[in-house]
Each structure stands twice: as C-alpha cells, then as structure tokens.
Image (cartoon, grey):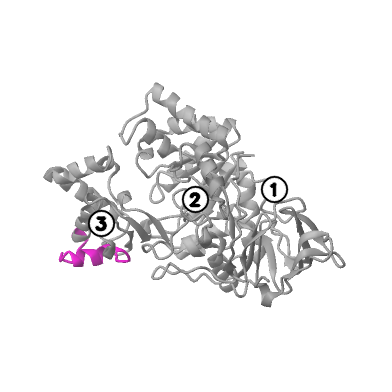
Amino acid sequence: MARLLASSLLAISAFAADYDLIIRGARIVDGSANPWFHADLAISGGKIAKIGNLTGKTASQTIGAQGRIVTPGFIDVHTHSEGGILHQPQAENFLRDGVTSVVTGNCGGSELDLKDFFSKLNQAKIGINLATLIGHNSIRREVIGAEDRKATRAEMERMKALVSKAMDAGAVGFSTGLEYVPGTYSATAELIELAQVSARYGGLYASHMRDEGDKVLEAIAEAIEVGRQSGSRVQISHLKQDTKAFWGNTPQMIELIEKNRLAGVDITVDQYPYIAYSTTLATTLPTWALAGGQEKLVERLQDKATRKKIFDETLDFNTKRGYSDFEYTTVARCSFEPSYEGKNIRQISALRRLPQSHESDVDTVLHLMQRGGVSVVTKAMSEDDVASIMRYRNTAIASDGGVVAMGAGRPHPRNYGTNARVINEYVRLRKLLSLEEAVRKMTSLPAQTFGFRDRGLLREGYAADLVIFDPEQVRDNATFENPHQFSSGFDVVLVNGKIAVDGGKITAQRGGQVLLRQ
C-alpha cells in the first residue's frame, strides 16, 4: 500500500483494469498557464491516457487527489548533474522538489563522450529524465588547454568536430561559460562558428554570459549576436545582476532581450529564486592570472611583483562592484580545509589572525586560490532584481544545482528547494505570480525551449511525468545556514508513470530516461 493521502492508493487486481493508474478528483494545472480545472487523469504505459470524467473506469492503482493540485513534472533546464548522477542515480534532492527532468552540461562544462555517458546512465537506471548540452569549456580544454589565445584554424575544426559528434549522440545544444577558463579567452567569432554546428542539428545556444554585472548589457548583446549569426535559439543562463553598484538595471536587461525578440531572435532566460549565486572563487581574480591552469597561477602568486598585480586588480574589482570586504562570500566546499566550509572570507581572515580589512580579505582569497581554490556561495543580488526577472514572461525557473550528497559541504540551498521556494515564497506569500504562471515557468516554457515535445504539459499521449501537491503545504526547507534539507509538500511525483515519491517519501522506483535531442 502506498502512503499518499492516508494510504488512499488502492490496488485493484481482481479484474482487468482500464488503466494502470487513475488520479481522481484533482485540480489540474496543465502547464499552459490556463486556469485550473477539476478532472480525473488516467495513465497507461507511462503515458497520460485520458483526462476528464473517469467515473466507472478502473485502474490497477488509484490515487484520491481531492484538494490537491496535479501539474506536469517540473523541468530544470540549468543543472550541473553530470558529476553526481552516476553516484546517486535516484537524484532524490531533485525528485523531492518536484523535478522529473533536468538539462545538464551547462556553463560550458559537460561530458565529452556523450554516447558513453548515456550508456552509463541507462545502466545506472536513473530516477529522473536527463538531457545534456555539449560544453564549450570542455571542448576548448580538450583541444587547446587553458591557454589565453585564439584557436588556430586546425583547432577550430577539431572543436567543431567534437560539437558535431555530441549532437549526433543526442545533445540538445551547445553551452558556454564565458566567465570561466578557458571559455573566457574565446572571441565571439569562435562562439558563432561552434554554435552554427549545433544549430544545424536544431540545437540551441545556452550561455553563462561573459559578464553579469557592470557589462551585463554588452554580454546580453553578445549572446544575441551569437544566436542571430548562428541561427540558434538562445537561452541566457541564470539571468541576474550580481554587482551591487548596478542593482536596479534589470528592466534595461529585459528591454534589450524583448527588443531583439521582436526583431526575430528567439531568446529565453532562466533564473533561480535566490539573492546568492554559487561558483568558484576563481571568478574574483583577473582572468589573465588563471591562464595555463593551477600550476601557472601558483607560479604567479609566488612571484612578489605578479602577486601584487593580482592583489591590486582583485581589490579594485571588488571595490568597483560596490563592496568594501568579502563578507558576502561564504565557502561551500574546501577539500584542503573542511573547517572553512560555512565560513565567509572575513571569518577565515580572522582565523588566519589577519586584521579585519578589505586588504586582508583579498589576501585570504589569494591564499585559498594558491592552495587549490574553493567553491563559494555569494550573496550579491537584490530581491527587487530577482522579482523583476521572475515577472518576465520568458523566464524559466532553474536551479543551477546538481545531484548532491546529503550532508556534504555547505552548498547553495537551490540544490534542494528551488521549485518549492517559488511556490511557497513567490506564489503563496508574496503573490508575485499566480500558481498557473509559476507552473508554466517550470514546465511548458522549458519544454518548449529545449524541444521536449511530449513533456511540460498535461496532454493525452504525453509522458506521465506528474507532481501532486497542496500548494498551501509546500515548503522550501533548505536554508543558507542549513542547506541539506529536502523540500516538503510534494506528496507524489511520477516519472514516466512510475511513482518516485509517495507520501512525500522516496520510493525504490526509478523511471528516468535519457532525453535525446528530438
């Protein structure tokens, strides 16, 4: 007996049933942003078989969903799941947040041999559906390394061949991470040429842009130009304004995007509903200092004059961003000193017995980078800007998270609570969005953008990826102080017709599939 709604899931095995499963008495929020309506929903063979009045029809299992909402499974189009999914194939942190499908390979980082990756995923019997992009940084590092230079013609041909190979294997598009090494060293022309290969297969161009602060408008313009010249659809990743000195310019960002949409460039964006991002501490250093990899960085930091130049530019960069310290940056993972996890840079400076000053914080940043670097959580956005971007009709909800191990490090809470936070905070409490519109941003908008033609809507014949919940009970329990907490309130989650979450608890069923480019 399943645990949903006081064990209301009933087995009917004495007679041949009409369907595998019937959900009765639900309020259907179908993913289109249309108003909810009452209906029953039947599933057979992992597909939605019927939506309507199913009185008199039988099923092998029945769920009584009176007072509950039924929506399509949430689709998270910006994740970094390739590193964790094979170790934790069930992906419980996603499932318990209502997510049934993810796109990985974002920010320019992906597996290179996708045929092998997909084979391993199928062998692992994953719990969620997974699609991937092919990452520019991964390709450039394979061909050129971490060098700060233009690609030669021969290198361009090798990179194009790798994109083509990945698209043949089923990648859904081409991603860039232009704040990161080595992608940051590439010119726009290189991006266009590689995106053209993806576009020939119908793939999109997803970009972690070159800048998300003072030059964000120029960065948006570059992403648009890549889309225009390559013929790709454009997905701007985790749109934000991450520089305090420029808070409030999100209307201009959206205006630029809309202007180009009206001119015929297909652009959408995604966003996570938090004022903090998570990345590597290396993004605080000048990019020239990172060329050649960790060994070269250490050499530069050991040279007194070069270290001073890196120090001065890092201090100047943070000052121009509007900050006089690094207290807003907290260590998430630190392999060489786990006790630093959960402490901000100012606190680590104090542990190092340094004076409490901006200069001491920069010294600590360089110290951490010299020892190998750390991942960080940085509170650098404003709530008003987050709300402005969320109101934009073409913003999808995405976590920028991954498959995480419970209790490991101090990760961003978005790994556990992104979708629950939207429903609890921005629908229920702030009333920024209607439930129907929020669900559209989590389902049909990402499905349409990434070409998932049989997901994202509750339609007969579509894959039976579903979430059943009471929106008044949904909570994002993960916090910055205590991030390892699952969301609550998502009573049932089905992946391709298999019950993955029942009564808010994970089951042993794994219904996930590899989603290849259609």
Mark 2 vs mark 3: give the one in front: 3
Is 344 magenta? The answer is yes
Q: Is residue 132 left or right of residue 469?
A: left
Residue nearest the viewer, comparing 221 with 408:
408
Amino acid identity at mark 2: Met
Residue wearing tag 1: 454
Quarter holding residue 494:
bottom right
**Is residue 186 visible in the rendered structure shown here?**
no
Is 79 magenta? The answer is no
Mark 1 vs mark 3: give the one in front: 3
Which SS class for mark 2? helix
Q: Are marks 1 and 2 in contact (CB under 8 Å)?
A: no
Residue wearing tag 2: 253
Q: Are marks 1 and 3 in contact (CB under 8 Å)?
A: no
Check the image and name the residue furthest to the top: 154
Residue in view at x 28 percent, y 62 percent: 338
Q: Along the polypeptide, which appears first: circle 1 or circle 3?
A: 3
Q: Is residue 367 left or right of residue 193?
A: left
Residue wearing tag 3: 336
**Is residue 407 visible in the rendered structure shown here?**
yes
Residue in view at x 69 percent, y 71 percent: 68
- Label 1 – label 2 distance at C-alpha: 32 Å
Amino acid identity at mark 1: Asp
Q: Along the polypeptide, which appears first: circle 1 or circle 2?
A: 2
Which SS class for mark 3? loop
Q: Quadrant of the N terminus?
A: bottom right
Residue stretch rendered in magenta on the structure: 341-359
Amino acid identity at mark 3: Phe
Q: Is residue 408 left or right of residue 362?
A: right
Crowding at mark 2 (Cα within 10 Å: few <14, some 14-19, many 20+): some
